[in-house]
Every structure is written in structure tokens, then in C-alpha cells.
Amino acid sequence: MSQNLTHDFAEIFPDEVVTHAHVRDVPLPYSAGTMALITLDNGLDHTRPSSFGPKGLAELDAVLDTVLARDDIAAVGITGKPFILAAGADITGMPRITMREQAKEIARYGHEVFAKLDDGRKPSFGFINGLAIGGGLEIALNCTYRTVIASAPAVAFSECFLGILPGWGGTWLLPNLIGADGAVRVIVENALNNNRMLRGPEVQPLGIADATFEGADFLERSLDWAGQVLSGRVRVDRPEIDRGEAWDAAVARGRAFVEAKLHGAAPAPNRALDIIAAARTCSKAEGFALEDDALADLLMTEEFRAGLYAFDLVQRRAKRPVGVPDKSLARPVTKVGIVGAGLMASQLALLFARRLMVPVVLTDIDDERVEKGLSYVRSEVDKLAGKGRISADQANRLKASVTGSTDKQIYADCEFVLEAVFEEMKVKQQVFSELERIVSPECVLATNTSSLSVTTMASKLAHPERVVGFHFFNPVAILPLLEVIRAERTDDASLATAFAIAKGLRKNAILVKDAPAFVVNRILTRFLSEVTKCVDEGTPVDVADRAVLPLGLPMSPFVLLQLVGPAVGLHVTETLHEAFPDRFYVSPSLQRLVAANKPGLWSWDAQGQPYLDEDTKALLEQGDRPSTEEEVRERAMAAVADEARRVIDEGVVAEAPDIDLAMLLGTGWPFHLGGITPYLDRSGVAERVCGRRFLPRGVASLPV
């Protein structure tokens, strides 16, 4: 371990996969001299990006000292193994950091190592040859010049998404390179917008890279460009940074964005904005010192621990769902059927055709509905082609692969048929009965029901063992969660086939036992019904709606209800009330709202602000027992804790992390909460309501 580190980080990072810094001398063209080219490589395949723990930093530190001391080289270059520059800090040991001094030392050492690329001894070149996230991007920013490959899939600062900030130079360097406006966008806004990443062609226009090159010869072209820069054939001119009112305006915009997103729920984005604000006038040393202190503070927060837990769920557990039969049992699927041609069915048809690249057939009760569904698919394909997401040839193949009919006989040679018809048990049972007479005995029959019993749906079939639930979340092309429901008689082969298809669709599937509304809708409906009950008791709508905003949820309850649709919300609530009448409240006000065909509680003014119009207000029947915001929040989270515990105890999912994964991927529940259960544990709600925690102490929380 480096002498520059005083703590024993070998114990904190016992499983570090060391990213090695390999050096080779490269003669540059145009008589520009020799470059010492450093290649970062952890020795693993491209699915395991290189990252930096203490040993990796120490090796890079020693290599930089050696090459920068050489008189026979003209420049230093740094790049990565194929397709990857680096993914930043090794976060595997972060949960073991127990003292702020340890956190600050890691921050300070990263600064010390990376800053050697910009210490003035040699010009340095960062060749972004693929993925560059967090510390990977900071390595490049510490260089004098940068190139980027056009095919780079992800260039980003994800730190604020996880509850920290770019702490190895990024928060000070980026605004001083591209200005505060772009820095706020990349560091804060992109991170909080579901961790949006820049793609290769977006990097240079922002000013992050000085040149963009395409193709397998990216490195050769970058080296040629470096030779031109060093020989004076190419001059790198960067626009002057506006350090006036525009800087303050960008920071103010960022603060307003953070408040609208998080309502003060997590400290990291505002700490990042503090440093961006200071970067307008402070020196690099002062800026790096601010980053050291901020990173040390944030690494010790509960929000960061919850963010790490959530990140691990999405990166690991989502890819290895618990309880799934062996994949060798899955049957091949060469043709898919979709029953229905409405909006949801049409979205599904396009998704299956695009991801599985197999023929997809859909039906409906008349030609007009079928044609409407096919027209939707064709128009969406044209949009994808127009945005350059697919080629003209791919667009033509996609359009040709989705066909429709009013005759269900077209399903005869399908191996997987998914119904997406009206949410009514008798209708779905009839559909399955008709399908069973047409398809082969091995064909898997799936239902996209959001709340109905899959077991009951399959109960009248000769082969109920081939029926599974396949619950997507809308919009299906965007939300990554898929609840795969095992009914009482579903067999392993059908279930394995369903999970294989989910993987082919690039969805994160979780295994759920057949139970009313499954996981996400059950917990979310319990949450919404408690807030709605508060309104019916007399709480003003605006008070109830903003009560849970301090949690940093993606939207307020009644905005969510508007997005889902009151009719859908009422249907799910009534289904759950029928199953659990003591816990799920059906609001008379919501029933009247649906009967009046209202899109929701809120109307919106010209400024985009919600208000309660007089017609809607007249539909509400309220009592005289209003609750405060705090009381609404406490009641809502107590209801969530109670329902989550019941879901686990009933075996609907295997463990609490499956609930958290479902809420993260299916509803956008914040990473800084870790899903639901870490927050319920941390706030004491779990023990107060359920008598016990959901997770062991130290998981998704500070070590004890």
C-alpha cells in the first residue's frame, strides 16, 4: 500500500480487483516525440469495468511518478482496456469505511494521484475509448487534452445519483472547463434524471472533449491527433468561460431543480452546487479541498449507504433473480402472440419484435382496432428511425415482423402468447379458454394483469401449469421492471421460459407469488389509499399531496394518481379491498371522480402549477378531522411498512431486497432511500409498526 495512505485500507477493501496501469512507449508522428501511454486494465472482461481502489490508485501513482520524471518522453497518454476507460472508484469497500478521516484520506489521495496528470511537467492526453463514469471521467478531466470515441455508451458523473459528488476533481474541473451551465447539467441534472449518461457524440459539443473519432482505429487516430497538437499543426482553442451572471444563474437553476426533485431529502446535489458556485473564483487547490471535505461528509451519510445498497440491487440482484428455475428448462420461442391491439398491447408488440427479433402477431375484435394497433407500431418505428436509433433496413424489418388479424388461429404456431385485454376476470378466462384450443400444449400463456389472480385465471384450463403472470409497467419501453408471477400450478419449464423472455426483453424480472396486486401495486395502493383517506377525513388536498415530498419521491401521490389514471387506481384499490377489506380504503370521492370521467384531482394553470377546480372540489366529500403534513406522512409510511411486512411474511417475495428492487425499478422510488425498507428501518417506522427491522443493522445504513 502507498506510503501516502496512513490507514490500513487493505482491510477495508479486501476484495479489490486491482486496476493495473500498463505503460508502453509510443512514437508520435510529425516528429512530436515519444508518448508514455498508460492503459488501465483490471484484467477482466468488458462486463467488469475497471475501477480504482487503494491498490489501483497506488499503482497508478507510482507509474505516473516514473513516467513524468523521464526526460525522453514528450507527453503522457492515458486510456483503457477495450470499450472502457474506467468506471471510477471501487465502491465495494465503501460500506466498510467507519470514520470520516478514512473517507477524507481516500478523497485526498485520489486528488493527489490524478492531479499529477496536470502538474505541468508533461502535456497529458486522456483518450476516452468507451465508458467513462465518475473517477474515469475525472482522470480525463485532469489531462491537458481529451479525445472521445463516437461509440462511447456512457460518459457521466453518477455520484449525486448515489448520494455523493465527483470528489476527485470533477466538481471543480468541469465548470472551469465548460462553464457552470454545462457542469450543472452533467453533475446534477443528468444524475438526478435517472442517472442519464452522455453518449460519445454529445461529449465534444459540451466542451468536455477536444476531438471525436470513430471506428476501431480510435486510438491510432487519437495518437495522430496528439502528434499534431504537440507539433503545432493543430491548435486547441477553447471558448472563454462566462464567469458573470450566467454562472450564478446556472447554479440557481440547479438549486431549483434539486428542490423540485428532492425537497431537501438528500444533501449531495446541493453540496455539489456549493462547490460549482465556489469554482467561479476559487483556486484549484481550494476547490479540491472543498471536494475532500464534502466527499468525507457524504461518505458518512445514511443516504449514501442507502444509495450503495440500491446500486447493488440494480447491478447484482436484478441480474440474478431469486428462486428462478434453471434456465436450461426454458423452451425456445420463435414466434410471439399478443391478444389485444390497444395502446398497451401495441407497445408490447413493438417491444417483443424489437428485442427478441421474432415475428409478433396480434388480434382484436375488429379490423379497425387491429389496424389502429399496427399503425401505432409503424409510427413508433418511424420515430426510432427518425432519431437515428435504428437504420432504415431495421425499420422495414420491424414493421414487417408485426402483423395482425381478427382470427386467433394465427396463434397456432406461437410458443408464447400474452394477453393484454380488459382487466376483467371473465374476459381473461374466456381468452385463455379460446387460446388453449388453438396453441400447442407447450405454448406458455401469459397475462399482463396488474391485480387479478393468475391462479383463478388458469383454473378452468386443461393445462393450468403453463400459465404465468407477466406484469409490465407503463410505459413498457422505459420502465425496466417486470413482475413474473408464479400461480399455484405454474410449472418450472413455463416459468423458466418466462424469465428467459424477460432477459431477452432487457427487463429486470422478479419472481412473485400469485397474490392480489402482487408487489408494486399492492404497496403503492396501500400508500395511496392512506393518503386519500386523510383527504376524505378533512385534510386539504394540497396538504396531503405535499406531505410525502420531503422523502424525495419522484412525484406526489395525486400527481401519480393522475399519471396512472383514476379509473385504474380505483380498480386496483377495489380489487385489494375485496381481498383485504380492513386495510385498503376505497374512497367515495375517488369513485365520484371516476364516474365524472375526471383525469385526476388536479387541474393545471398556465404556469404549470396544480390547482383544484370548482367542479372537482364539488365531487369531494370531506369530514372535519384534518391531519397535518407530518401526520399524513407518518400514517402513509406506517401503512407501507405494515404492507411490506405482510408481503414478505406471506411469501409473495423472497426477501425485503426484492421489495426494494421492485419499487426502485417499477416506481422510481429514490436511490437515496434505498427503495423502501432501508428508510423504514432508519426512521424507526419498521420497529414501531412491525416490531422488527426489515434488514440487518449495517445493511444500507452506517456500520454499527
Image: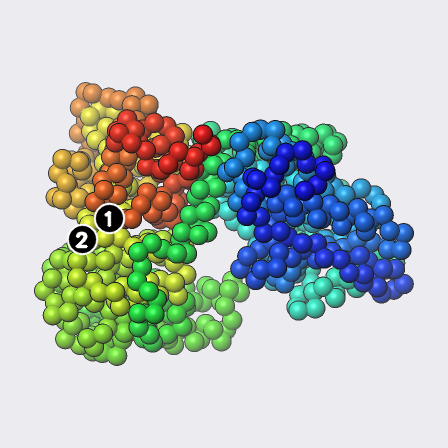
Whether residue 476 is situated above or below residue 115 in the rendered picture: below
Whether residue 403 is situated above or below residue 627 in the rendered picture: below
Crowd around label 2: few <14 · some 14–19 · many ≥20 (10 Å): many
Is residue 457 visible in the rendered image? The answer is yes
At 29% across and 31% down in the image, what residue appears? 692
Looking at the rendered structure, the kind of residue marked 2 is Leu
The number of callouts visible is 2
Tell which tag, 2 or 1, sits nearer the viewer.
1
Task: Determine whether, in the image, residue 697 is placed left or right of residue 50.
Answer: left
- Tell me where residue 625 appears, x and y as whole percent: 20, 20
The quadrant of the rendering that contains the C terminus is top left
Looking at the rendered structure, the kind of residue marked 1 is Val
The quadrant of the rendering that contains the N terminus is top right
| Pointer 2 residue | 452
| Pointer 1 residue | 652
Question: Circle 2 — which element?
Answer: loop
Question: Circle 1 — which element?
Answer: loop
- Tell me where residue 19 appears, x and y as whole percent: 64, 52
